[in-house]
Each structure stands twice: as structure tokens, then as C-alpha cells.
Image (tube, coloured by chain):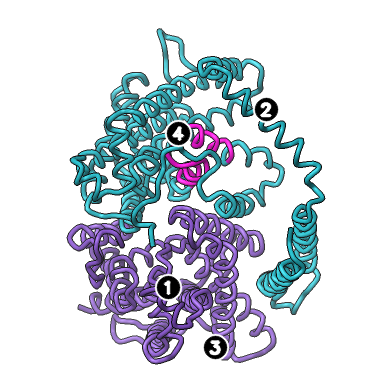
Amino acid sequence: MEFFIQQLINGITLGGVYALIALGYTMVYGIIQLINFAHGEFFAAGGYMGVILISYLAAQGLHPYACLGISLVLSMGYCALLAMAVERLAYKPLRHASRLAALLSALGMSIFLQNGLMLTQGVYDKPYPTEITSGGFEWGLVSVSYMQIFIVALTAFLLVGLNVLVFKTRIGRAMRATSQDKIMSALVGINSNRIIAITFAIGAGLAAAAGIMVGLYYGSVNYSMGFVPGIKAFAAAVLGGIGNITGALVGGLIIGMVEIFAAGYISGEYKDVFAFIILIGVLYFRPTGIMGENVDDTRV
Amino acid sequence: MLTIRESKKLWIGCGVGLVWFFILLWPLLGVTPEGLEFGKTFKVFGTVAVAVVFIMLVYQIKEAGYLDSLGTPMTSVTGAIGQLYAKTPRWLLLASVLACALVFPLVTGRYAHDVSISVLIYICLGLGLNIVVGLAGLLDLGYIAFYGVGAYTYALMSLHFGLSFWLCLPISALTAAIAGCVIGYPTLRMRGDYLAIVTLGFGEIVRLILNNWMALTNGPNGILSIPRPEIFGWSFKPLWSMYYVILAIAIVTIVAVYRLNYSRIGRAWEAIREDETAAELMGVNTFLLKLLAYATGATFAGFAGAFFAARMKFVGPESFTFLESAMVLAMVVLGGMGSIPGVILGVLALVALPEMFRELETYRMLVFGGVMTLMMLIRPAGIWPAKRVGRRSEDAE
């Protein structure tokens, strides 16, 4: 039983992280129907920015948690700027080209950014300072680290914030309008280019937060860390029905849970296989994802 | 000709871009626990800024019309070449290309053999994927899995049962084709991006199985000492002889894909690519033909895989990652989907060109990614686009 609870806690933590990355995929897809392959790299860049800034601020003698807070905000801002630059350079000129061209452009950007990170930061893992990552509670065999609590709390906070932004503010309304019909929303005076840039920025900001969380959770970051979580998060977005924000959360939690439980009860080596099998199974029976709408053939 | 206003806008955009670039670059290079540093950043930034300003100046001069005197003779030269190309009989062109390919290893060194062998392997892979993506319009991001299946089939068959390479070649192709059907079957109901992610998932599953099924595949250590092919007791030890093996496989692939392209099946695939619903209404059995596209594409990957295992004498799961799938897809799309010379050009552009920049090893992949994006921006339809392409109905707004 303790093992089960422990796995549940780990699953929620990991699932929350996947959900945050998945949100970026889902929002971008919802608005311009593009799989943003470079999204995993925003996540990695966020993780790196976190380490760089925390190390710098800690050297200035700040309290570790203050360092963490400031770096979190700055990293999210950094990745937002990065995403806007990538969008402007690699996606905007291809808005009316074929989808495959945009997809490949995204793939090129992903390789470019990954290698940019490698060239500037080196090929070796960069550790997060231990004074932040250590510490936690224990109840019998169940242990919860402060980091897990922090990750779950921050995920919840960001999700609520995003929900407010999308459903309560003017920008959110403009985003929803643009994702439904670009031409009509342009007619009522919405600058769709600006909305798309904002969507990219928000998605990348969330991915950056996820990057820092993964860095804290595993204790280090690596230049190539964006790929696997990126793919799983994309799987989560598709699982939940791409374009659907609640779906991304549900999908992220499912993928995270499946991974942790498969690792705990079946086999640690094949944990990634189960995540993909669940994905394929769900898509086989519901080709548009769990929460996806039944769009007609021409739009899928 | 740019107006002053347009050119002003261009320069302002360029300036904003450079400021943006600095903001993105400096934290990566300049923030260290020891303190803030600017020297390294300015070095990189300065180089990029000078390059950008230079390109902008050239662009301005070109737009202003000062380069026309250069351009006119250039167009006449390319026009003359085009006319010559159109006049020469097709068989003469093909024969000379074939002759070059045959003579190639006799006049070059080991390194060139190595590069040309990998070019030919990628040509097989690219043409195979071209059937799935270029002709049938099914976006496959896990194509490399079939290559892996082919390679492992040969490795295991030859080591455990002592079967010869020539016997294993069709067996590898068959197992790859079966894998293609297994993967293709559940994905047939999906379209577009869902299909892409599921094929990606399948590719990853195959890689993870290769990586973890210790008893069969020896896991991450891979399988060693795979035998070379033999013919009447003479084994293909020297590298140049392996070149001829893959050249033969590549020629078979090219001919087969060409014939398929202009057959009933090829036309049906193209119909599916252009509009699946319409094709179905016109009596095309989309279910069977999509499955066939997967199987045929996988067959060529199986050939290439078996050869790859024989050439490297080693297979390991590291050779079959998503990045490889992405590379093959990039070759197909970069060259021009559905066009055979296009795919070959794409392979040359992505395999042979980076080899020339070997000295810049560390920057190779960075440049590769950048060039990939840039190519898409400049020529979204590919270097040598196929003649018969429309727009997928899904792309229409």
C-alpha cells in the first residue's frame, strides 16, 4: 500500500510536469495546427537558464529559495523571448506553405537549438545545487520531498493562472477567437500575428517552468533532455485531444501515471513503451483523443 | 527595387532581430557563478552581426539592380544547360550517370567510398520513405524502425542460423514489410498529425525493444561480428566491393520506385495523397493501398537495413533513433516529395555536404538544423519538386 501511495505521488509529480509541457504543444497546435518540434528545446533551455541563474544568484549570497523564485520568473521570460524569436524566424514565413514544410522547419529549429545549447553549455550534465533539491517529509515508507510539493503546487498555480488568462481576459478571448477562425477574428480587429506570438510565448514559459522542475526533480540538466519529455508531452497532448487545454492536463497525468506505475510494477526498462502503447490504444479507439472533438475528416 | 520605406523597415527589423539575439545569447554565455562576463558574448555576437549586415547589404544591392549585369549571363548559361538537358536523349544521361557511379570507387579513396556508401544507403531509405510520405501522403515519423528490423533480421539470421547475405536480403525485406503492416494496420484510421505521432510512438517502441530485449538483441551493446556477404566463396572484404553491393540495391530501388510511381498503384497512391475521400469515392481501395504503401516502403528499408548490418559488421539500437527518422524525412521533403531525382538530391545535400565541413565538427549539427529551416523558408516545395502534386485537402484553409 505504501508503495502504491508513493508511486501515486511520484506519478502526479511527473504527470504535472508533462502536462505543463503538453500545454505548450496543445495551445500552439490549437492556434496554427503545427506540431512545434522545437518545444522540447524550450523546455531544455528553461532548465539550463534555471541552473545558470540559480548558480549566479547563489554566488551573490541570496537565500536558495529566493534564487529559485527569481530564476523561475527570469527563465520563463527568457524562454518566452526565445519562442517568439523562433516563431518569427522559422514559422511565420511558412504560415501559408504546406504543413510538412512547417513541420520540417520546426525540426530544423529543434536540432539548431539543441546544438546551440550544447555548444554554449557543454555536453555534460549540469547539476542543480543540492541545498535546493534536498529535504522532505517521511511517513513510514512514503517519502515526499519539498521539491515534489513545490512542483505540484507550482503546476497547479500555473494551470489556474493559464485558465484565468484563457477564459477571463481579453487576450485569452482573442486567442480562442483566433484558434476558431483566423479570418473572422482578423475582421473584428484581432491582430492574429500578435496572438500567435503570445501563444508561443506562454507555451514556452510553461515549458521553461517544467524544465526547472525536472532539473530540480532529477538534480541535473542536459542539453539533450528536451527530446524524450517533449515526445511524451506531445503524446499527452494528443492523448487528451490536441488543442484542448483540459485534455493536455488529463493526458499529462495519464502519461505520467502510466510511466511511474509501469516502472514500479511491471518493468523499469519498458516504462516508455507502455506510455506509447496507451497512446496508440486510445487513438485507435478514439482517433481524436480523449477530450478531442469529433472534427470532420477535412480538419483532422 | 525596394522603396526607401521598405528598406528602412527591413533594416529596423534586422536591428530588432540583432538586439533580440543579444538578449538570448548573453545569459547563456555571460552569466557564471564567478560574475557577469561580456567578452565571450561580444565575440560571437560580433561575428553574427557582421555576417547579417553583410548579407543585408548584398540583398539591398541586388534589389537595387546592381547585380543584374551578373545575373543576365547566369540565366543564359542555365538556360543553355536546360536546353542541352532537354535535347539529350534520356538513356544517354542515365548511362553516363551509371558509368560515373560504376567508375567512382576506382578513382577515389577509402573516405570517399565510406561517404558514397552512406549516400546510397540513404537513397534507398529516402526512396522507401518517399513512397509512404511522398506518394501516399502518409506522414511517417518512425520509418527508421523498419531499417532497424531489417538490420537485426540479417544480424540474427546470419549469426544464429548461418544464412548467407543473399538469402537474408529478401528475408529482411519480408520481416520489415510485415513490421510495416503491423504498424500500418492500426494507424489506417488516423490522418495527419495523429498518424505522425503514432508512427513516432511505434518507432520509439521498436527502438526500446531493441534496447531492452537482452536475450535476443544483446541490448545496448548491440550485436558484433556480423559476417560480410560472400559470392562463390569470395567475401566482400574491401570497402569498394561493398559499394557495388549497395549500388546494385540502390539501382533496384530506383527502378522499382520509378515503375511503381507510374503504375496503377502509384496513381492510386497519389490520388489518396491529394484527396483521400475523393479517391475512395472513385473506387480506390484506400485501406489496402495504404497498407501496401507501408509495406513497400518498409521493404526498401529492410534491404538497406540488411546491407547496413553487413557493412558495419555491427548493429546497435543507437543507429535507429528518432533523429535518423527525422533525417530521412528531411531528405525526402528537402529534395522534393514524390520526385526521385529530388530525393537523391536531398540525400546528397544532407549526407555529402556536411561531410565537407568535417573540420567544423562541433558546428556541423548546428549548421544542419539552421540550413534545414532556411531551406524550408526559401523552397518549401523542395529542391526538385515532383511534377504531379496538388495540395492536400487538409492544407486548404
**Chain letter of the cyan region:** B
- The residues colored magenta run B327-349
* Amino acid type indicated by mark 1: Ile
- The answer to whether marks 4 and 2 sit on the same chain is yes
Q: How many marks?
A: 4
Image quadrant where one finds the N terminus of chain A = bottom left
Image quadrant where one finds the C terminus of chain A = bottom left
Q: Nearer the viewer, residue A241 or A73?
A: A241
**Chain letter of the purple region:** A
Quote the CA–CA distance across marks 3 and 1.
Answer: 40 Å
* Amino acid type indicated by mark 3: Gly
Callout 2: 10 Å neighbours few (<14), some, many (20+)? few
Q: SS of the residue at dot 4? A: loop
Where is mark 4, residue-wise?
B314
Chain letter of disc 1 in the image: A
Q: SS of the residue at dot 3? A: helix
The image shows residue B104, relative to residue A194, as above or below, that is above
Tell me what residue is drawn at x 55 percent, y 52 percent: B376
Where is mark 2, residue-wise?
B80
Tell me what residue is drawn at x 29 percent, y 80 percent: A141
